[in-house]
Image (cartoon, rainbow, N blue to C red):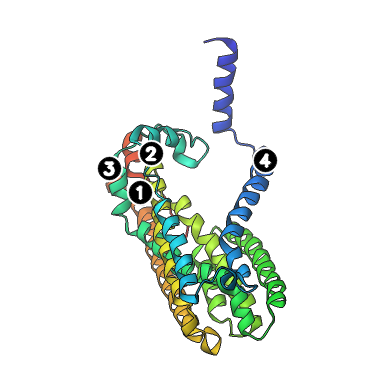
Amino acid sequence: MTEPEKNGSEAVSEVNFNTDAQEDRRLVRKVDLRLIPILTLLYLLSFLDRSNIGNARIIGLATGIHLSPPAYNTALALYFIAYVIFEVPSNLNDDERSRLLARLKADSDAGHDERFKWFYVRQAISDHLVWGYAFLFHGFSFVLYTLSLFMPTIIVGLGFGSWQAQLMTVPPNALASISIWLTVWLSSKCNLRAPFIIASAIVAIIAGGQYTGVHFAAAGVYTGNALLLSWPGENVSGQTKRAIAVAMQITIGDLGAVAGVLIYRPEFASHNFRKPHIISIGYLLFAIAVTVYLWVWMSKENRQRALSLENKDLHKEIELSEEERLKLGDRDVNYRYVL
């Protein structure tokens, strides 16, 4: 081994065993300053492309292209169907998937040399927690996308003009942005997700039918959505299993958006879309129920695993090889879920 290689190896060892909190914070800030601005811009453009049709509708889009109200809703649904289909990376072969997974060096256990195996796919599909994350997003996405796509229409229905409605979508979204930043920061400090997701859903549910209620709905739905999307990334261990879990969450979740845009139809517009709003509340209650289930189950599992480690009779069972631990992933007795 050459001297530079030796020093490099020693440096890696130093990083692994002698962590410096101040140096770690400096490094994280440096990476964040590089990545977050461009990723934020890309997500802004992505979401703008998805939601601006709602603004275009109230200033004459449907009339200009002779699009009937049912056809407008169908067009929105078709967008999300395509979005769901192309979310799954089915265009990649086994070798390409393995190469992509090998590139995830900086993400927790992604530095391990894990080759793609169907075992991990089956492990993800058979995990009730993975389905829970997916159904949780399904409950929120129903309200998330109907709110973003129909907010201008809902505000017009409250008696405001089209250009007034355009401007009046700004305060609810601004409040939602502030809510996301504050809640995510507090959630990270407490290292808890479930109670904040539940609180966000409750805030959205108590939103009334007036303009003030739109603010509560936006703050609750967007904040809860930001938290729940991070949950499988934190709690699913194993590169392939995590990739499948995230894909399932987005795919099943976006089916809620398809249902949402079909429910907010012109024939349900009476009383400021009362019936669709009631259905939205039902979806949020479903999301709360799923969150409670995940929270209770993972809390119980964390306690049981802690007790197992204290039980000397299980000492032999706990001493696993590195390969066995990687295969178990988040089912390993040493693994702890983020609640």
Above or below for 248 versus 208: above
Between circles 2 and 4, the one closer to the viewer is 2
Residue at position x 47%, y 70% in the image: 142
Cα distance between the residues tagged 3 and 1 = 20 Å
Mark nearer the N terminus (2 vs 4):
4
Number of other residues with Cα within 10 Å of mark 3, as a class: few under 14, some 14 to 19, many 20 or more: few
Mark nearer the N terminus (3 vs 2):
2
The percent position of residue 193, horizontal first and vertical second, equals 51, 62
- The residue singled out by tag 4 in the image is 34
Q: Is residue 202 visible to the viewer in this orientation of the structure?
A: yes
Number of other residues with Cα within 10 Å of mark 4, as a class: few under 14, some 14 to 19, many 20 or more: few
Look at the numbered disc 3 and give the secondary structure of its residue. helix
Cα distance between the residues tagged 2 and 4 = 29 Å
Residue type, mark 2 in image: Leu
Judged left or right of residue 187, residue 303 is left
Between circles 3 and 2, the one closer to the viewer is 2
In the rendered image, which quarter is residue 7 located in?
top right
Residue type, mark 4 in image: Arg
- The residue singled out by tag 3 in the image is 119
Residue closest to the eye, 13 or 261: 261
Judged left or right of residue 290, residue 125 is left
Number of other residues with Cα within 10 Å of mark 1, as a class: few under 14, some 14 to 19, many 20 or more: some
Cα distance between the residues tagged 3 and 2 = 18 Å
Between circles 3 and 1, the one closer to the viewer is 3
- The residue singled out by tag 2 in the image is 92
Residue type, mark 1 in image: Val
Cα distance between the residues tagged 4 and 3 = 36 Å
